Image (cartoon, rainbow, N blue to C red):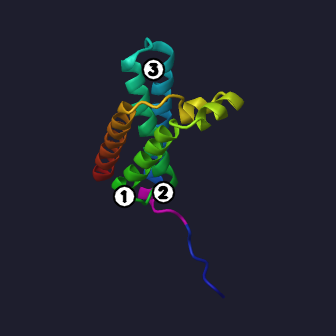
Amino acid sequence: MIARQETRRPPRVARRRALAAAAGALVVAAGLATHLLAPEGPLSDAAGDALYAALVYLLGVSLVPRARGWRVAIGAYAWCAFVELLQLTALPASWAASFPPLVVVFGSVFAPQDLLLYAAGVVAACAIDSAARRSA
């Protein structure tokens, strides 16, 4: 008789994934609150960019919970930078014209300062994730 191997995730992997999902829900709520309640301007734009980058980091952790934080951070920042640089083309605008909610994911106008705000959001999310992992 062949012994069946357990394929259960280690508790710390499941815990990290669950914490990332919960934090992601909080980041989405904060982003929506910023969008709906804060006056439109540079401060709300900056908060939105940093929250977007933090959410991308948390999605990365949810998808690959065993990965080291710095690796997820590099991937998250690469995605954010790619999306920002993609705005130099007409593609995001044409996609948003076809399906307006895509403007939330792909943006509409290139702004070089967004690259710094993405870095800040990813670094903050990675630092909080690292602190949570150390306390576990």
Q: Is residue 76 left or right of residue 102?
A: left
Q: Which residues are magenta?
A: 8-13
Q: Residue at x 35, y 33 (%)?
A: 117
Residue receiving disc 1: 68
Cβ atoms at labels 2 and 1 below 8 Å apart: no
Q: Camera-side residue: 17 or 1?
A: 17
- Foreground residue among 39 and 69: 39
* Contact, mark 3 vs mark 1 (Cβ under 8 Å): no
Q: Where's the N terminus, which quadrant?
A: bottom right
Label 3 vs 1, first from the N-terminus: 3
In the depicted structure, whether residue 57 falls above or below residue 7: above
Instruction: Provide the residue designation for mark 2.
Output: 64
Q: Decide if residue 96 is on the left or right side of residue 76.
A: right
The residue singled out by tag 3 in the image is 34
**Three-letter code, disc 1:** Arg
Q: The residue tagged with tag 3: helix, strand or loop? A: helix
Q: Position of residue 111 (x, y in %)?
A: 42, 30
| Secondary structure type for disc 1 | loop
Are there few (<14), some (14-19), or many (20+) residues within 10 Å of tag 2?
A: some
Q: Is residue 70 magenta?
A: no
- Compared with 83, 67 (above or below) is below
Element at label 2? loop
Disc count in the image?
3
* Position in image of residue 26 (x %, y %): 46, 32
Q: Residue at the location (43% across, 11% down)?
A: 39
Q: Provide residue 49's location: percent of width, then percent of height.
A: 42, 31
Q: Give the residue type that dot 3 points to.
A: Thr
